[in-house]
Image: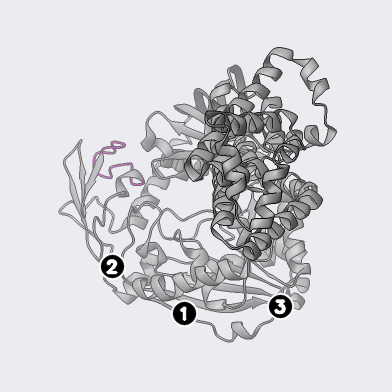
């Protein structure tokens, strides 16, 4: 109001003459003080918190020009923000009484719930809303008790884009004719009215959106996003399938209408793609290991694609609820009943209660039988190999057949239909698989030397495996056969891995057998950044199960996983071994990283021994 009063004559002359010169001349008459006047006005607007700074920024551009006007406003913003920070720092609770605002407190509370990162970007976004008061944003940041360097960066850098935009708007007004200037001012006024009217709704939308964390992923399921799913289909169908020479036969399955269940065997990392893509444009909601959602960025992508997180080998009611939501929406539920990647190209055991799930859903069951995928991209490999993959689709169960069969009969049928052996298939097909470093990575799953029985002694280079203990050399050829002069070496990866299983099965029969490793323990990061270290200790496995003795979050703890609850110990090659327990994932990284596979093999042997005793 004071500004309008002071400039009333200059504004009147500007309107009469259709020129901005009277206003700029009035500012010029103040000399240096015009810069000071703009900065001081900007400071007061921030301290008052409720008045937008846009008008003074436009006036600054008109009166001082783009560069000086921007610098004057920026100086005022820095000083005003500093003043707000000092008021809160020094006055404490009294300042909160002075600036008391229930709306502001609610905004701050909801934004901080989502973590510091969201809070930072939320404040920066507020600066981008036209005519939103800078003081209110600085006040929100100050109330959050940020350290000054961070507070300074957020409130200064955040204000720069909108300040620059307002300066450019002011400069544009001076260069246009009277009509255009009035139109621009009119647009500005409309924006001001709209933001004033709707800013609460905008803030409410931002702060009350679901927090996309693990609870959100587990409690909701989406229809696969059409655009995202289409681009995924396009990439896989047009690039990946030709490169890997994928051939599929639908056998009439594409005519089936959802809802139905899609199951597939799990020899490789890309089996979901081999099973989903041929059914396009029908979309599949995939059941995906909880592990992959622990990085919330990746989890959001999977969720948009219709992914449903699942605790593997662990009761999970949330997954069942999400499956029912998919059925209600007439969708397709896709999953691999093995629940894990095969380490040696043959079928692993089915996840417990798979047959009960099929019985409960009572939907048509379609199977995608994948052959050659292990040889193309096995669990242990660093690179894909070009050969051939065959996928055969078949409806294996109708709702009527499911109702008629017992769970035991369903389990037998699933095991029979899903059974695969990529090495047996390869013996019949004799397909060459070409790629670099064919044997590299194998040393991490073939950990027992069949010649000297020494553990972790193999190294791999290109297509050659060498035992550092006895010196035996083994070449992996392009047909996935081992070539060697030593008769004790198995003929392929499958037979070598089965040899290891047999060795460990004999070992666990020894009285008092214990497997022990020093480990680092990680839990899913609470902020969704994957996994974070929570402790160190010792893991031991014996006939009773797995025991961890060590620290968790600085406190000494002992956690026991009963053998009946650990049918499988999952492992990442040269990464970790995992146990799902108490609705979280225990991610163990052994000191000797090559022990990961042994924990899986020994765990299976001890569980099988337990099952025999129970029977």
Q: How many marks?
A: 3
In the image, is residue 328 part of the stretch drawn in magenta? no
Q: Which residue is mark 2?
A: 433
Residues under labels 2 and 3: Cα distance? 37 Å
Q: Which residue is mark 1?
A: 248
Instruction: Point out the tag, 1 or 3, that comes first from the N-terminus.
Output: 1
Mark 1 and mark 3 residues within 8 Å of each other at the beta carbon: no
Question: Percent x, y for residue 330?
Answer: 74, 73
> Relative to the observer, which residue lies in front, 532 or 372?
532
Q: Nearer the viewer, mark 1 or mark 3?
A: 1
Pointer 2 local density, CA inside 10 Å: few below 14, some 14–19, many at least 20: some
205 is higher (above) or lower (below) than 88:
below
Q: Position of residue 498 (x, y in %)?
A: 39, 52
* Residue at x-position 77% and y-position 73%: 404
Q: Which residues are magenta?
A: 445-457
> At which x and y percent is residue 399?
75, 75
Which coloring applies here? one colour
- Indicate the secondary structure of the residue bearing disc 1: strand
Give how far apart the Cα atoms at labels 1 and 3 are. 22 Å
Along the line of sight, which residue is nearer the eye, 256 or 509? Answer: 256
Is residue 600 shown to the viewer in this render?
yes
């Amino acid at each position: 109001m004071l500004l309008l009063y002071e400039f009333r004559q200059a504004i009147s002359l500007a309107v009469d003459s259709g020129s901005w010169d009277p206003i700029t001349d009035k500012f010029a008459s103040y000399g240096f003080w015009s810069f000071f006047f703009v900065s001081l006005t900007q400071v007061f607007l921030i301290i008052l918190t409720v008045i937008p700074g846009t008008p003074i920024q436009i006036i600054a551009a008109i009166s001082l020009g783009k560069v000086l006007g921007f610098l004057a406003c920026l100086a005022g913003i820095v000083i005003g923000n500093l003043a707000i920070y000092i008021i809160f720092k020094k006055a404490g609770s009294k300042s909160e009484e002075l600036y008391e605002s229930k709306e502001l407190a609610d905004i701050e509370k909801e934004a901080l719930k989502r973590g510091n990162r969201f809070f930072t970007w939320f404040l920066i976004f507020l600066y981008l809303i036209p005519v939103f008061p800078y003081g209110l944003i600085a006040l929100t940041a100050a109330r959050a008790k940020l350290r000054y360097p961070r507070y300074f960066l957020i409130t200064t850098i955040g204000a720069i884009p909108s300040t620059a935009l307002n300066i450019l708007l002011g400069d544009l007004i001076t260069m246009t004719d009277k009509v255009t200037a009035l139109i621009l001012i009119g647009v500005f006024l409309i924006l001001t009215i709209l933001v004033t009217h709707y800013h609460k709704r905008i803030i409410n939308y931002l702060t009350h959106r679901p927090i996309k964390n693990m609870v959100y992923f587990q409690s909701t399921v989406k229809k696969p996003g059409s655009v995202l799913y289409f681009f995924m289909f396009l990439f896989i169908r047009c690039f990946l399938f030709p490169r890997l020479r994928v051939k599929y036969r639908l056998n009439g399955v594409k005519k089936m209408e959802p809802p139905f269940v899609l199951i597939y065997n799990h020899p490789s990392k890309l089996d979901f793609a081999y099973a989903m893509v041929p059914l396009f444009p029908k979309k599949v909601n995939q059941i995906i290991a909880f592990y992959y959602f622990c990085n919330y960025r990746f989890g959001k992508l999977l969720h948009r694609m219709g992914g449903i997180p699942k605790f593997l080998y662990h009761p999970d009611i949330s997954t069942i609820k999400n499956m029912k939501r998919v059925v209600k929406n007439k969708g397709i539920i896709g999953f691999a009943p093995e629940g894990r990647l095969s380490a040696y190209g043959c079928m692993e055991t089915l996840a417990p209660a798979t047959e009960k799930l099929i019985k409960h859903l009572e939907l048509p069951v379609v199977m995608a039988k994948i052959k050659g995928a292990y040889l193309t991209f096995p669990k242990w490999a660093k690179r894909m190999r070009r050969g051939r993959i065959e996928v055969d689709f078949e409806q294996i169960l109708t709702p009527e057949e499911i109702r008629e069969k017992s769970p035991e009969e369903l389990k037998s049928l699933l095991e029979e239909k899903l059974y695969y052996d990529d090495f047996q298939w390869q013996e019949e097909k004799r397909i060459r698989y070409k790629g670099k470093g064919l044997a590299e990575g194998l040393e991490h799953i073939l950990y027992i030397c069949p010649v000297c029985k020494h553990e972790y002694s193999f190294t791999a280079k290109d297509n050659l495996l060498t035992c550092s203990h006895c010196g035996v050399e083994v070449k992996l050829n392009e047909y996935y056969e081992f070539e060697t002069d030593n008769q004790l070496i198995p003929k392929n990866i499958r037979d070598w891995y089965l040899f290891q299983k047999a060795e460990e099965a004999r070992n666990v029969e020894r009285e008092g057998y214990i497997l022990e490793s020093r480990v680092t323990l990680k839990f899913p990061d609470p902020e969704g950044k994957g996994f974070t270290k929570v402790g160190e200790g010792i893991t031991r496995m014996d006939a009773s199960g797995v025991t961890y003795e060590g620290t968790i979050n600085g406190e000494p703890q002992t956690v026991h996983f009963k053998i009946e609850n650990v049918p499988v110990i999952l492992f990442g090659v040269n990464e970790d071994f995992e146990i799902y327990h108490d609705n979280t994932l225990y991610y163990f990284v052994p000191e000797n990283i090559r022990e990961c596979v042994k924990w899986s093999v020994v765990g299976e042997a001890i569980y099988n021994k337990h099952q025999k005793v129970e029977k």
